[in-house]
Amino acid sequence: MNGAVRAVVRSAINKGCDAFAIYEGYEGLVQGGTMIKQMFWEDVRGWLSEGGTLIGTARCAAFRERWGRLKAAKNLIINGIDALIVCGGDGSLTGADLFRHEWPDLLKELVDTAELTADQVKGYEHLTIVGLVGSIDNDMASTDSTIGAYSSLSRICQSVDFIDATAFSHSRAFVIEVMGRHCGWLALMAGIATGADFVFIPEQPPDAEKWGDEMCAIVDAHRKKGKRKTIVIVAEGAIDNQLNPISADDVKNLLVDKLGLDTRITTLGHVQRGGAAVAVDRLISTMQGVDAVDAVLSSTPSTPSPMIGINENKISRKPLVESVALTKEVATAIKNKDFDRAMSLRDAEFAEYLEAFKFTTIVDDETRKVPVNKRLKIAIVNIGAPAGGMNAATRAAACYCLARGHTPYAIHNGFTGLARHDSVRELHWLDVENWIIRGGSEIGTNRNLPDVDIGMVAYYFQKYAFDGLMIVGGFEAFLSLYMLEQARVNYPAFRIPIVCLPATISNNVPGTEYSLGSDTCLNALVDYCDAIKQSASATRRRVFVVEVQGGKSGYIATCAGLMVGALAVYTPEEGVNLRLLETDIEHLRNSYAEDQGQNRAGKLILRNEKASKIFTTNLIADIIREEAQDRFDARTANPGHVQQGGIPSPMDRLRATRLAVKCMQFIEQHQDDGRETRGSDQKSATVIGISGAKIVFTPAKFLYDHETEVENRRPRGVFWTEIQKVSEMLSGRPRQH
């Protein structure tokens, strides 16, 4: 929420508007006075790293009454406010839209009762309302993610990861209760991201008579396969299909009584709401806050109030009233036992994740297996530098294969391991069961391409009779895919469906706007930069120049710059020159002069490692120090390979699971083509990616020929241009012409 307030304030000021903060929600709107405060540029410095909401929030009974809304209208006009950007849940947004519809009548009453004069209300005939959804439950229809949802999910996953170690050590079962009265998003996503055995969500409740047996059967099957721990996640609104509540105690008692498991309950409670926002929430809240201001300025009296949302990677505007109505319809559908309707009102991603969870959790279910003659041998290989989510993708692919009756194989240590050591190993369920929370690459990865010995690679493909291949990795993985596709003319063993799942912190693979590992990297950078800014703030007069990875792609530097509020970002796409440095140093001087040492938020400049051969991180810091003339200091910081390591973020775990399942389904769907046909079929050698608002498969040859700067190892188009513009605008950085 603080990121959204910061974005709205600075974007409004940038566009020549006056920005106000209304403290304590609608309560502040009703009370007025000091609860409504004009905000200036420096007032919101450092807000991105603060948890909660610094302007407060509160439930307000008065605003639910007409007299309360009448007072609120008067306070808005007195302060010269003609537009409201409301960040809250469906109740807050419903109240805001009602306020807008009543506005003309409220103004008339204020004039009729002499509370205000006709001259005072002149120019305020219309109230513009724009909604931002702040909800950890992610329960708003028409948007993939609400502000705060991923931060909450991160707290849950971190807690369950800690509990996981205890559960394994003592061979215990844990029942985890998470928030979500009418929405099971947190429970489902946490279940996938932590490798839980079973989840209970209100949208798809289990059979009242059978759920205990079904849960115990799955848990027992996992235990018989050698699993030492059991995790069951229960949404607080969990019910069975007869609307009877399912509590954590109910689940615990069954696990104890039927399976004899030593079982504990953990209710996470308001821990889920705490802490600083994770990287993706900082991005979402900022981009949505900026778009909200644009929506205000483009609004007309006849424009329906918009709700700012996000679909896949794109900021979107939806009619607020319709979105709220659809959201409330979920609860109605559940109450009416129309669970199919409740599921349909969630986005398609939700249903896909639920299906992916079942495929990666339920074992030895013959009804899910394909006929024996359609069972495949599918290989998985990791290529390139380690990236968060690689292991989660391998696990999901292997579990899907086993659920369908296919045989998954891991090629260890890349194509080098295959060509030199015949490093092919069959994967079993227990092998991969706990990989989802592990960073790095359990099967090993390197940058070597298949041309290390392509003939030997083809020999082993033929020896094991692979029917499909999933390559997980970065730009080298993409090049490997292209090489194998090109080698089909000489090596029939490569005439199998091959799909590349991008996984690289650089996010530089063509054909996608998202690569596994990039979110984990950004979280690591956010944590690192928050700590660095704290150090800088203590001295009041210090700027840190932080060197970030990313190769010749400026994606990570650009996004991290926005997420930590950097004053400037240097990328390979734009480069660095003396004129740019001179402008940025002047910007630094002005920034320090304006806050006069009073603001404790430290200042950062981010430099991509390949931004310039001449202007290194140390040289830039030296130039700043020299030009500062003792008015401020400059230091360098380099997080290095910390950016590649660590526990994968929930988003990387989730998308790894979803995309890996899609990859396996792609391989299944392309089995009917004969090998001869596939020799010239470019569509069966493809990159899976997220583009715009959907998942796409793009042939490797098309990407290589039309959308790739091979020499710079990046896509031709820079799809994060808008992020770069917003980052510079919110930092106040002057644009170079």
Image: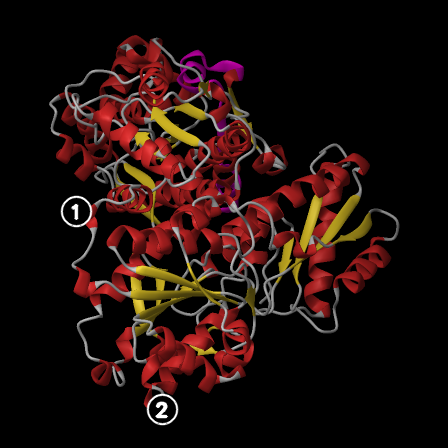
**Which label was assigned to residue 490?**
2
User: Is 18 colored magenta in this rendering?
Assistant: yes
Residue furthest to the bottom in view is: 490
Q: Which of the two residues, 6 or 199, is positioned nearer the viewer here?
A: 199
Give the camera-side residue of 137 and 477. 477
Total marks drawn?
2
Q: Which residue is mark 1?
A: 367
Taking the image as shown, residue 220 lies to the left or right of residue 31, namely: left
Quadrant of the image containing the C terminus = bottom right
What is the magenta range?
9-34
- Please rate how many residues cluster around mark 2, counting C-alpha atoms within 10 Å: few if below 14, some from 14 to 19, many from 20: few
- Nearer to the camera, 692 or 447: 447
- Mark 2: amino acid: Asn
Residue 188, given in percent of the width and then of the height, sits at 34, 35
The local secondary structure at tag 2 comes to: loop
Which residue lies at the image location 61% right of the left edge and 56% below the top edge? 734
